[in-house]
Amino acid sequence: TDACVVVNGLRKRFGPTIALDGMSFGVRPGLVTGFAGPNGAGKSTTMRVILGLDAADEGTALIGGRPYRDLRRPLCQVGSLLDASALQPGRTARDHLMWLARSQGLGARRVDAVIEQVGLRTAARRRAGGLSLGMRQRLGIAAALLGDPPVLIMDEPFNGMDPEGIIWIRALLRSLAAEGRAVLVSSHLMSELQDTADHVVVAGRGRVIADASVARLLETA
Ligand code: ADP
Ligand code: ADP
């Protein structure tokens, strides 16, 4: 298989809670792969394990054949949108991106390019604490795009987005995949993924309950 993210048999417990119960799927380059399922299905935990932020009790999550921690320049190889809790509210959005850029050896030109790409030109000069949730999502997406990574992991990017933002992010995700990137995007709403993803992995209770093209999923629904 040519999948560049391969999740195989992940199991994880938090005390008595079984978060992952044999989660397995692949994410291919050139496609938007939706990761659907109700709250608590294990989507975030899977993404955190892929990104090395959480350890699984069993199983593997590989990116281009390696675990995240073994990637040579991880931030340039995998862009991610998790929650924006790392934002320092007193700094401007642009300062935040400059700080992240420096840690990847990137400069102000790249920062201003991603600010433009996510439509934050005016908001980038405001303090991050005053940004709406939709703007903070755009800022998180800008951070994910900084290193121009071939793999993007986006956890609930539609949260807090207004209708215009939802249309914008759909087009963005599709163009990122059309350029050959592997894009994994989670949502608890199938409707958000239906018009965005080529392929959907449906999770339930810590495992995959369907894994098919959107066309096939809609046929069998
Ligand atoms: P989803 O992203 O699909 O909503 P999660 O991966 O966030 O699902 O959660 C899967 C299960 O694991 C849920 O029952 C959740 O409450 C539990 N869980 C996730 N993270 C933690 C944690 N840090 N501590 C305890 N339980 C957790
Ligand atoms: P300073 O805050 O003086 O720039 P450092 O650059 O050493 O000091 O940052 C200390 C820590 O604060 C970093 O490891 C990071 O976790 C956090 N941090 C610094 N700048 C930012 C920023 N712009 N956005 C988010 N976190 C930051």
Image (cartoon, rainbow, N blue to C red):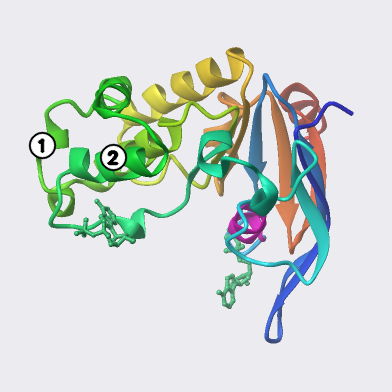
CB contact under 8 Å: marks 2 and 1? no
Q: Nearer the viewer, residue 177 or 133?
A: 177
User: In what quadrant does ligand 2 lie?
Assistant: bottom left
Span of residues in magenta: 42-49
N-terminal-most mark, 2 or 1: 2
Q: Which mark is residue 97?
A: 2
Q: Residue at x 73, y 57 (%)?
A: 204
Say if disc 1 is inside 8 Å of ligand 2: no
Residue 190 location, x and y as percent? 60, 39
Residue 43: x %, y % from top left: 63, 54
Rendering quarter of residue 38: bottom right
- In the image, residue 44 lies in the stretch drawn in magenta: yes
Please rate how many residues cluster around mark 2, counting C-alpha atoms within 10 Å: few if below 14, some from 14 to 19, many from 20.
Answer: many
Q: CA distance from mark 2 to mark 1?
A: 11 Å
Res. 101 visible in picture: yes
Query: Which numbered disc, 2 or 1, marks the residue closer to the eye?
Result: 2
Main SS class of the magenta portion in the image: helix
- Nearer the observer, 97 or 216: 97
Closer-to-camera residue (39/131): 131
Q: Give the image quarter of residue 202.
A: top right
Residue at point 65%, 54% (across, down): 69
Counting from the top left corner in percent of width and height, residue 11 is at 80, 67
Identified at 69% across, 49% down, the residue is 70
Q: Is residue 6 magenta?
A: no
Residue at 40% x, 46% y is 159
Instruction: Say which mark, if any, is on residue 107.
Output: none
The residue labelled by disc 1 is: 125
**Amino acid identity at mark 1:** Arg
User: What is the tally of numbered marks visible in this picture?
Assistant: 2
Quarter of image, res 152: top right
